[in-house]
Amino acid sequence: MILIDEQGTVIQGFIPPSRIDTYLPHMIAGSLYRLIKFYESKSKTVYRVSKQDVTIFFSWNSVLENCPVQFLEDRFRFYGYEEFESACDLKGDLYDYIGHIKLVNEQALGDGLVLDEVEIASSRRILVHVQTHDGPVMKLYLWDTAATDFCLKFKAQENTPSVILVTTVNPKRFGDLDVQPTKDYLAWLGSNSEVSNMINTDIVTKAETVTIGELFTYIKQEGAKVAWFECTATIDDIGHGSAWYYIACGGCKTKATKGPTTLMCKKCGKAEVAGVAEYLTNLSVYDNNDHARFVLLCDAGRDLTGKLASELVESYFEANESVGDDAVVPVPQALIDTIGQTRKFVVNVSKHNLESKTQALTVQRDDAAGVTVKRSSDGIESGETKRAKCG
């Protein structure tokens, strides 16, 4: 719920599923109530739609009473275009707006304007172009119940309404095809189509920035697909329960397998390949609200430490000549030194994450996000990783 008090402060409200039948039947949108006994909790960033970062939760002993307090007219403040422009996408308080109607669902006002109730019920929205005085024309989207109510009120008027008053508006900015600069650019692009062929999508595509909590929310969504995200997190620890690297085929970087006398690659089909150490490091990370396990893969490890995994492995054996080739190389200091650092990671939500086969998220370098990468499912396994005896 979105709640607003007599001081005009907007805050989110939440009724747990087990208590919905107790409270919701007695609540009417737009009515005034006094809520007794409740508790507050920090709002999840992904769900926040108001400036306040807390949510009011109904508890088992909450009491909801009708309230005689009335909102004074001066509590409503109407905003113009400049104020909407500066408030866009800030997830701040909700605003009130009054203006005259230019279009309704792309139709001009007049006796011939007809609203299709079936189409509105299907799309669950109405689009109204509005304007205050001589300011820019803005789009006002009415959703769900608000769209239905507008349709009923609009059709019930004897004369075609020309002025609209709306409260609790949430200003958003998004690309429009009907604004003049967009029309001008599309017209230019139509006569210069060869320009689009010069764009390398692997270069210009950028991963969406999310928090750890938003990553897990995305994974749980129905219809979620394999995707890349950019996530800033602090390294809490380096996994010590498994090896921090694996021996890969020098060509395709798939985990190499041991043959009688050589290393082999099942993917390449070669009976003899050069083995090279590659990162496969478990990181425990966190941000402001959540923890996660990131698996640092291949070149992403070099981006973190500044060194190749093969360099660190060779350095260990050079400093410990008495150690046999089958020794397990401990986590190097270069990785331990990253604990406590806050870094930006490019994270792959894989098919295995979506199928709930693993909660570990694969991290790779920026230039991998624009291509399909299958290394995380090409037979790379955890466990004790030994030094490559050849290559």
Image (cartoon, rainbow, N blue to C red):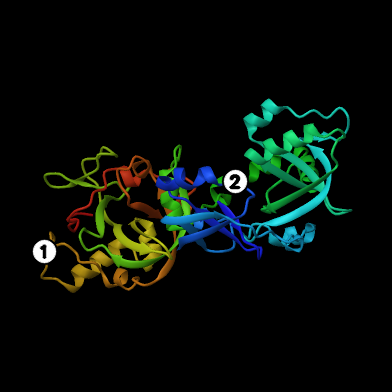
Q: Viewed as shown, does residue 345 lie left or right of 292?
A: right
Label 1, label 2: how far apart the Cα atoms are: 75 Å
Towards the viewer: 166 or 256? 166
Q: Viewed as shown, does residue 298 lie left or right of 259?
A: right
- Disc 1 on helix, strand or loop? loop
- Disc 2 on helix, strand or loop? loop
Q: Please state which amino acid type lies under the numbered disc 2.
A: Ile
At label 1, counting other C-alpha atoms closer than 10 Å, the crowd grade (few under 14, some 14-19, many 20 or more) is: few
Q: Which mark is residue 87?
A: none
Query: Does residue 34 appear in the picture of this structure?
Result: yes
Q: Viewed as shown, does residue 180 lie left or right of 26?
A: right
Question: Horizontal and vertical percent for residue 252?
Answer: 33, 46
Q: Please state which amino acid type lies under the numbered disc 1.
A: Gly
Question: Horizontal and vertical percent for residue 81?
Answer: 79, 57
Q: In the rendered picture of this protein, how many numbered marks are placed on residues?
A: 2
Question: Horizontal and vertical percent for residue 311?
Answer: 29, 65
* Residue pointed to by mark 2: 28
Residue at the (77%, 58%) spot, across then down:
78
- The quarter of the rendered structure image containing the C terminus is bottom left
Residue at the (15%, 44%) spot, across then down:
259
Question: Horizontal and vertical percent for residue 364?
Answer: 40, 54
Query: Does residue 209 appear in the picture of this structure?
Result: no
Q: Are marks 1 and 2 in contact (CB under 8 Å)?
A: no
Mark 1 or 2, closer to the camera: 2
Towards the viewer: 248 or 375? 375
Towards the viewer: 348 or 168? 168
* Residue pointed to by mark 1: 324
Towards the viewer: 220 or 267? 220
The numbered mark, 1 or 2, whose residue comes first in the sequence reads 2
Residue at the (30%, 43%) spot, across then down:
357
The image quadrant that residue 65 belongs to is bottom right
Q: Viewed as shown, does residue 391 lie left or right of 11?
A: left
